[in-house]
Image (cartoon, rainbow, N blue to C red):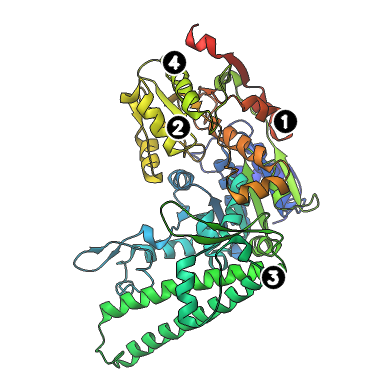
Amino acid sequence: MVLSTKDQIKELVLYQKPDSLEYRDGQLETVVDILYGFLVEKYKYVILDAPTGTGKSIIAKSVSDVLNSMFWEQEHSSLFLTKTINLQHQYTNDFKDMKLLMSSSNYDCFNEKSPVLAIDSIHQGCVYNKSSGNCLYNKARDEFEESNTKILNYSFFFTGLFKYNNSDTLICDEAHNLEESIIDFSTIQIELEELKVLCKFHGIDITVNHEDDITFNIIEQLLKLYDIIAKFYTEKIQHINSAVKSGIEVQGKKLNLETLSSKLADYESRLGSAISILKLLYLVHSSGSLDNWVTTIESPKDGGDFLRIKSIFIDAKLNDLIFERPKRVLLMSATSNRVKESLKLTDKECKVLSTEYLYDLDNRKIFSVAGTSKLNYSTKEKVIPEYIDICDKIIGMYDDKANILVHSSSYWLSEEILKASKLKDRIVIPKSSEEIMELEENLKPDSGKIIVSPAMLEGVNLPGGIVKCQIIFKLPYASLGDAWVKLKTDRDEGWYKANTLFRVIQASGRIIRGPSDKGEMFILDSSFNYLINNTKKYTPNWWYETIKSLDKSIISGS
C-alpha cells in the first residue's frame, strides 16, 4: 500500500479505529502527522511533544495499529516502552490486545500440589517449567512473543536488549526519562568485598580502595577477571546438564533433581550477572578512555562499599545498539525538549511535532507561593515547620473531604510532614509502586486523604477531580553531593535545571488528565522563580501561562 497524502492516511486511520474509540480534539490530526512523517517524509525518528493529559497513549496505539495492519505480511510488530509500572498497567488496562512482560520474579511457578513463590532465578532452573500451563512466566513470555503489540519497561528492555529489541517500530513513552534510563543501564556496580573474594579465588590481582585507583588499566584487569568468571560458570552449567542427560552421579552423589535445579539456577544467575558486567566493561573499554565515565567508590548506609562506573553522556555504541534495529522510533513526552539533544539526533533523521494545549488553562492553575524562606540542608530545621504550616493552611482552603496530593522530595521529608502536620490523621504515605498503584486504582472522590509521596511525580493517573489540589513541597533537584550529578552538571549545560523543571511539569499533569478535569497546584519552594527564569528555553508556553504568584500572607490570612 502506497500512501502519499495526509487525506489518504486519515482515511486509513479512521478505517482501523475501533468503534468504541472517540478521538479528542487534535488527536486524529496528530496520528496522521506522525504517520506522514514515517511513511511519506521517511523520517526514522518522530518526537511528539504534547502536554500532559492530551492522550498520548491513544495517539501512539493508533499509530501502532495502522503500521501493524499495513505491514502485516512482513509480521510487523510494535514495542512500547515506559519507565513506570503504573503507566504500563494504564496501557494494558486500556488496550487489551497489548501484551506485557515483566521479569520472572513477578510471576509464580506451580506444580500439581502447591505454588512455589517466585524468586529472581527460579525460572531458569525451575523443574516445573516443562509442564504446560504450570509456569505463569512462561505463559506470559509466550503471549508476549506471539503478539504484534507489546510493552516493557525501560529497565527490563535494556537488560534483555539483544532478546527484546526485535520490533519494527519502537514507541518510547515518558521519553524524557530515556537518557537517564540508558545511562543507568550502562552503569557498572561491583561490590568491593565480593571483588576481593573473586580475585583471590581466580588468582587475579586487582586493588581498588579509592577513586584514584580506578584507571583504564583497572578496566582491562576487570575484563580479564569477568571473562574467567563467565567461562567458569559456563563449564559448571555444562557439567550439570550433561550429568542430568546421562544420569551419572555428580561429585559422587546420586542425582537429586530438586537440588540440581537449585544449583543450576544459582550458577545460571551468577553467569548472567558476570556476562552483564562483562558486556558493560567491553563498552567502557571500547571507548578508549574514561573521559565519558565517572568512577567512584560508594558507601551506602545499608550495605558494603561498591565500585560504580557511570557514563556522563549516552555511549555512542550503546546508542547504536538500541536504535539501529527498529525501522521507526516514536519518542513521546510532555517535556521532550532535551530528547533530541541527548540522543544526538539530526534534523535529517528526526521530525519534531509539538501540539498546543487545547483545553481551558484556567482549569489547571499553578500558584508559586511568594515570601517563603529558602529551604536547603542548612535551613531545614527552621524552614520545614514553616512550610508544613503553609501546607496545612492551603489544604484548609479545601473541603475536609477533598483528596490532596503533596509531592515531597524524599521519604524522610514525608515522615517529617506526617509528624508535624495538624492534619496527620488524614495523611497516607505509599512506599512502594504496588501501594501507589493500589491507591491510584481504589482512591474515591471525597475520601479526605492527604497523600504525601516523593514517587508520584509521573506515571500516575488521577483523573476526573479525584484529587482537587497538589502541592510541591520542595523542588525535586538531583543531589549535587553525588559525584556523577556534579560532573554531569558541569559537563552538560542546562541538564541540572532542566531535569528539575521537567519533573515539576510532569507532576502538574497527575490530576489533569482530560479536557474537563480541574485542579490546582501550589509550589512552596522559594527557588521556583529562579528555576523558571533560568529554564525558559525548555518551558512550554502553555505551561508557563498557567503560573501565578500568590503571596503566603494571603494563604495565612495575615
Residue 42, position in %: x, y? 76, 54
Above-or-below relation of 261 to 394: below
Q: Earlier in the sequence, mark 3 or mark 2?
A: 3
Residue name at image x 55 percent, y 52 percent: 81
Tell me the quarter of the picture where residue 261 sits. Answer: bottom left
Of the numbered discs 4 and 3, the one sitting upstream in the chain is 3
Label 1 close to label 4 by CB (< 8 Å): no
Residue tagged 2: 462
Residue 83 higher or lower than 390, as above or below: below
Image mark count: 4
Give the mark toward the camera: 1 or 2: 1
Q: Give, as a three-letter code, the residue at label 3.
A: Ser
User: What amino acid is at disc 1?
Assistant: Lys
| For marks 3 and 1 on the same chain, the one whose residue lies earlier in the sequence | 3
Under circle 2, the secondary element is loop
The secondary element bearing badge 3 is classed as helix
What's the amino acid at mark 2?
Leu
How far separated are the C-alphas under marks 1 and 4? Answer: 31 Å
Measuring from the top left, give residue 107's x and y in whole percent. Answer: 35, 59
Determine the CA span between mark 4 and mark 2: 23 Å
State how far apart marks 1 and 2 are (Cα). 28 Å
Residue 23 visible at all: no
Which residue is situated farthest in the top direction here?
A: 558
**Alpha carbon separation for disc pair 4 and 3:** 57 Å
Q: Nearer the viewer, residue 180 or 108?
A: 180
| Residue beneath disc 1 | 536
Q: Residue furthest left?
A: 113
Task: Please give the label number shown on residue 286.
Answer: 3
Task: List the residue tagged with mark 4.
Answer: 393
Badge 1 crowding class, 10 Å Cα cut-off, few under 14, some 14 to 19, many 20 or more, is few
User: Which numbered mark, 4 or 2, is in the foreground of this view?
Assistant: 4
Q: Position of residue 53 (x, y in %)?
A: 55, 33
